[in-house]
């Protein structure tokens, strides 16, 4: 059995006693306080050593996700890390000279095992995240629904759930925002038998562009750290986003966004506001998506404050009339969208009155809930960008200078750019590298102009 340093033994003993007494594990903060250490990073390093030596497990990213390993299972084994596997689009794996030492409880009782480092977010609903390490049992067969390493096209490997179809195989991501891969033939390299999670995700700090899966990144945000969230999620109507499946099953779509809304509430400060831009979709097949979102937020305990009518003046492009000049079945074409405003726990957002930078004229104009604003014409590669005037009004009306503004579906960065222009901190999240690059260029331009003034 592996030996422990004095400090590792202290940490292990504290975790063991804590779990035996309370039935749950301590947080890193509680361990730090008990041992009178100064840095959480020190705790993180010792926890990583305890995991590698086989004394504890860490099941997920929760604050209390440490588990004890049965003393009978402390035997350790070294297995090779044979490469990096994508949990997104297929990518050729490459050999790297590494190995990993794990407790035997990570392995099956028989068979040959190897490890792969995960790159991508397509398996997040299976608890497999970017940066994790998966332990694979080498085998050539699998049951429907197994998580497998699949070789396709002769030289590309991918990590997916596998299902046999009439004309071949479906490699299904465990992320409803991504599309499955259909192939006629597949070479199964092995089956996932366990996952070793990355201990600490990098902390998201204000003033940065973050490119990646929204749920992975927003979960790294501290509680009560955002003053205003503004976003418009993908509408699930088949728009051509750079890196997103915009045609999910509707219930899967709602379930996915409900997880995002749950995290949004968590990160908002008391009195923090969430401005959600959305519109009903479809004309012939009307989908009241704005009502569904409002119901989700009310169930989460968010207070529905108001709704703003954003009149877009798009009637000139109208083509769908239904029964023209007849009451038989005429269509109403929405020439507006909603901006629904919610707040967390309380109405009031506390702040320094000196940092309220909205003018009297702006306040009076913006407090009228009918906002007549033309849609954005310079799309910068995005199918549905915000007009800057819309974001300017929301930021000035609902936040103080130096507040932090979040857009978790940031697109090409309108929220981040306007936040920078108005003296706010920003956090921009988007899964598309193309959009994130545009957003960074826009923010850098605003910040550089601010330095010249």
Image: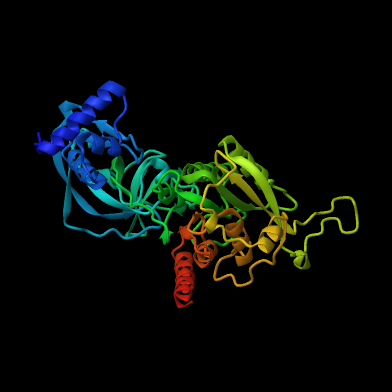
Does the rendering let one see residue 108?
Answer: no
Query: Which quarter shows the N terminus?
Result: top left
- Taking the spot 42% from the left edge, 59% from the top edge, the residue there is 210
Q: Quadrant of residue 79?
A: top left
Residue 421 appears at what percent x and percent y? 52, 67
- Return the residue found at the far front: 354
- Return the residue found at the far bottom: 452
Q: Name the side, left or right, on which 57 lies relative to 177.
A: left
Q: Name the side, left or right, on which 61 lies relative to 2.
A: right
Does the rendering let one see residue 33?
Answer: yes
Establish if 256 lies above or below 436: above
Q: Quadrant of residue 40?
A: top left
- Taking the spot 61% from the left edge, 61% from the top edge, the residue there is 358
- Camera-side residue: 122 or 44? 44
> Tell me, what colour scheme is on the image?
rainbow
- Taking the spot 49% from the left edge, 76% from the top edge, the residue there is 453
- Return the residue found at the far top: 21
Residue 242 appears at what percent x and percent y? 50, 63
Establish if 172 lies above or below 449: above
Residue 126 appears at what percent x and percent y? 39, 41
- Across the whole image, how many numbered discs are drawn on residues? 0
- Camera-side residue: 126 or 145? 126
- Taking the spot 60% from the left edge, 66% from the top edge, the residue there is 388
Establish if 236 lies above or below 3: below
Residue 70 appears at what percent x and percent y? 20, 27
């Amino acid at each position: 059995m592996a030996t422990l340093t004095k400090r590792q033994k202290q940490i292990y003993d504290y975790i063991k006693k804590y779990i035996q007494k309370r039935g749950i594990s301590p947080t890193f903060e509680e361990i730090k306080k008990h041992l009178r250490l100064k840095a959480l990073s020190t705790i993180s390093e010792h926890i990583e050593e305890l995991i590698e030596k086989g004394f504890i497990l860490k099941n997920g990213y929760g604050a209390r996700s440490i588990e004890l390993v049965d003393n009978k299972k402390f035997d350790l084994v070294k297995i090779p890390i044979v490469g990096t596997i994508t949990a997104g689009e297929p990518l050729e794996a490459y050999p790297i000279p590494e190995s990993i030492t794990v407790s035997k409880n990570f392995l099956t009782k028989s068979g040959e095992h190897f490890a792969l480092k995960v790159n991508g977010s397509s398996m997040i609903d299976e608890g497999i995240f970017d940066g994790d390490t998966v332990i694979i049992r080498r085998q050539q067969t699998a049951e429907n629904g197994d998580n497998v390493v699949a070789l396709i096209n002769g030289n590309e490997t991918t990590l997916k759930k596998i299902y046999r179809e009439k004309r071949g195989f479906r490699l299904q991501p465990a992320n409803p925002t991504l599309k499955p891969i259909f192939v006629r033939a597949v070479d199964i390299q092995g089956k996932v038998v366990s996952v070793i999670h990355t201990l600490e995700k990098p902390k998201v700090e204000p003033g940065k562009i973050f490119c990646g899966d929204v749920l992975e990144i927003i979960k790294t945000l501290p509680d009560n750290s955002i003053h205003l969230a503004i976003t418009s999620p993908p509408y699930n109507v088949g728009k051509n986003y750079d890196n997103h499946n915009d045609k999910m099953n509707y219930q899967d779509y709602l379930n996915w966004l409900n997880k995002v809304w749950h995290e949004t509430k968590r990160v908002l400060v008391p009195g923090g506001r969430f401005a959600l831009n959305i519109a009903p979709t479809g004309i012939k097949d009307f989908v009241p998506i704005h009502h569904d979102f409002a119901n989700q937020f009310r169930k989460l305990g968010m207070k529905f404050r108001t709704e703003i009518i954003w009149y877009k003046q798009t009637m000139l492009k109208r083509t769908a009339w239904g029964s023209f000049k007849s009451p038989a079945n005429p269509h109403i074409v929405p020439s507006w969208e909603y901006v629904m405003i919610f707040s967390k726990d309380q109405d009031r957002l506390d702040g320094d009155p000196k940092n309220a930078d909205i003018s009297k004229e702006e306040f009076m104009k913006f407090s009228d809930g009918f906002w007549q604003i033309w849609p954005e014409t310079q799309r910068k590669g995005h199918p549905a960008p915000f007009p800057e005037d819309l974001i300017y009004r929301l930021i000035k009306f609902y936040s103080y200078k130096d507040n932090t503004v979040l857009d978790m579906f940031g697109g090409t960065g309108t929220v981040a750019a306007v936040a920078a222009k108005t003296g706010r901190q920003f956090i921009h999240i988007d899964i598309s590298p193309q959009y994130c690059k545009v957003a960074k260029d826009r923010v850098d331009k605003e910040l550089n102009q601010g330095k010249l003034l």
